[in-house]
Image (cartoon, coloured by chain):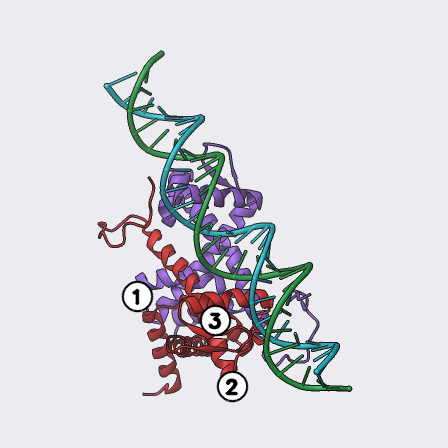
Chain colours: A purple, B red, C green, D cyan
DNA sequence: CAACTAAGTTAGCTGTAGCTAAGTTAGGTT
DNA sequence: AACCTAACTTAGCTACAGCTAACTTAGTTG
């Protein structure tokens, strides 16, 4: 017996080194990353070309078609996309919502990095990894900072 | 035939949507995350108690001892730690170096978040996920921003 | 309309990262 | 010295995320 997933909210009296919960959250974020990245790109492709093909996704992510196929099946299972054999991939409502939120967050993160003097190239690249770990609270703070930057004297 | 891992630096003439390289970097970051998190915590435990026990790591990360055992074996294989059966875990030079760098980066990221008005609690939590995706360039920019904050009139 | 090709699928492999359950070992207690 | 118990290990499972190789389908083109 050894189950670490229990203490979801036992209100430990200020655990000495409560890393556990934080790491749990990072692990959870990793779970959602793939979905977020895929729906974001799918939305982009649909916007650009009207549809998202498996081969385009493979190209975009730099992985094989087989890998994309696997992932799409998972995303379909989880209700983010619809796809029929040999046909293009489309987003469900759930997928579209996630895509919009992800995109917005991505842009905020990227712009924040730029606002700190990071070159757009690097900002774009780092935002890709960072975005998935930015909590609501932090995202809000980023937005506030950007707003402040835009109208310095106020 | 379908290998996406080839184009390491073929200097494509400004690829239209060169997401691929970015995503590749995010995947690479994920690879190193575990190592960074572990050596950081191991260093901390050694600092506090003189040694790092498997059971403490399990507690810290909120995973089972079996999982930690696996991970430690991988870290040993990769030359970050030394460990003998039923004994505590210690860092190699390589491990210590990684731990120091990770810790420093972690602190910079956390402090940057705090400097943007995020509460320390959240900053600490988000830093945990974000730190692994902060490039050298970005880290430098973070440091500059912190330095500027500390002496506003200059 | 036949055939070719690009797109998509399937099968089967690897490695990481988690888990449970059951077994060992080391070290402290009696 | 014997024995408990906590710490550690091992075995065997799941899911994700990648790969290659081989196959099928759809769509274009001669």
Task: From the image, tell me which residue sits under label 3.
Answer: B37
Residue B96's tag is: none
Q: Which of the pair A149/D26 is nearer the observer?
A: D26
Q: Is residue B112 above or below residue A74?
A: below
Q: Chain of mark 2?
A: B
Task: From the image, tell me which residue sits under label 1.
Answer: A119
Q: Chain of mark 3?
A: B
Tell me the distance, in whole angstroms, between the alpha carbons under discs 1 and 2: 43 Å
At 68% from the left and 80% from the top, the residue drawn is A13
At 68% from the left and 69% from the top, the residue drawn is A7
In the rendered image, residue B20, in percent from the top left (x then y), is placed at 35, 51
Please identify, in this view, whether the residue under mark 1 or under mark 3 is nearer the observer.
3
SS label for mark 3: helix
SS label for mark 1: loop
Residue B56 in the figure: left or right of residue A43: right
Few, some or many C-alpha atoms within 10 Å of disc 3 (few <14, some 14-19, many ≥20)?
A: some
Please identify, in this view, whether the residue under mark 3 or under mark 2 is nearer the observer.
2
Residue A61 in the figure: left or right of residue A102: left
Few, some or many C-alpha atoms within 10 Å of disc 1 (few <14, some 14-19, many ≥20)?
A: some
Q: Quadrant of residue A113?
A: bottom left
| Same-chain check, marks 1 and 3 | no
Label tally: 3
Residue B10 in the figure: left or right of residue B122: left
| Same-chain check, marks 3 and 2 | yes
In the rendered image, residue B130, in percent from the top left (x then y), is placed at 45, 68
Residue B50's tag is: 2
Tell me the distance, in whole angstroms, between the alpha carbons under discs 1 and 3: 28 Å
Q: Chain of mark 1?
A: A
């Amino acid at each position: 017996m050894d189950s670490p997933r229990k203490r979801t909210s036992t209100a430990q009296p200020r655990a000495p080194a409560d890393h556990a919960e934080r790491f749990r959250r990072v692990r959870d974020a990793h779970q959602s990353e793939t979905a977020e990245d895929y729906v974001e790109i799918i939305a982009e492709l649909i916007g650009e070309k009207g549809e998202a093909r498996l081969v385009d996704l493979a190209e975009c992510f730099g992985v094989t078609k087989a890998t994309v196929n696997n992932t799409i099946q998972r995303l379909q299972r989880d209700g983010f996309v619809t796809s029929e054999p040999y046909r293009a991939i489309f987003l469900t409502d759930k997928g579209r919502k996630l895509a919009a939120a992800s995109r917005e967050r991505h842009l905020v993160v990227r712009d924040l990095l730029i606002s700190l003097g990071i070159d757009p190239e690097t900002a774009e690249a780092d935002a890709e990894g960072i975005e998935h770990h930015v909590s609501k609270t932090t995202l809000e703070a980023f937005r506030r900072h950007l707003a402040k930057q835009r109208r310095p004297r106020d």
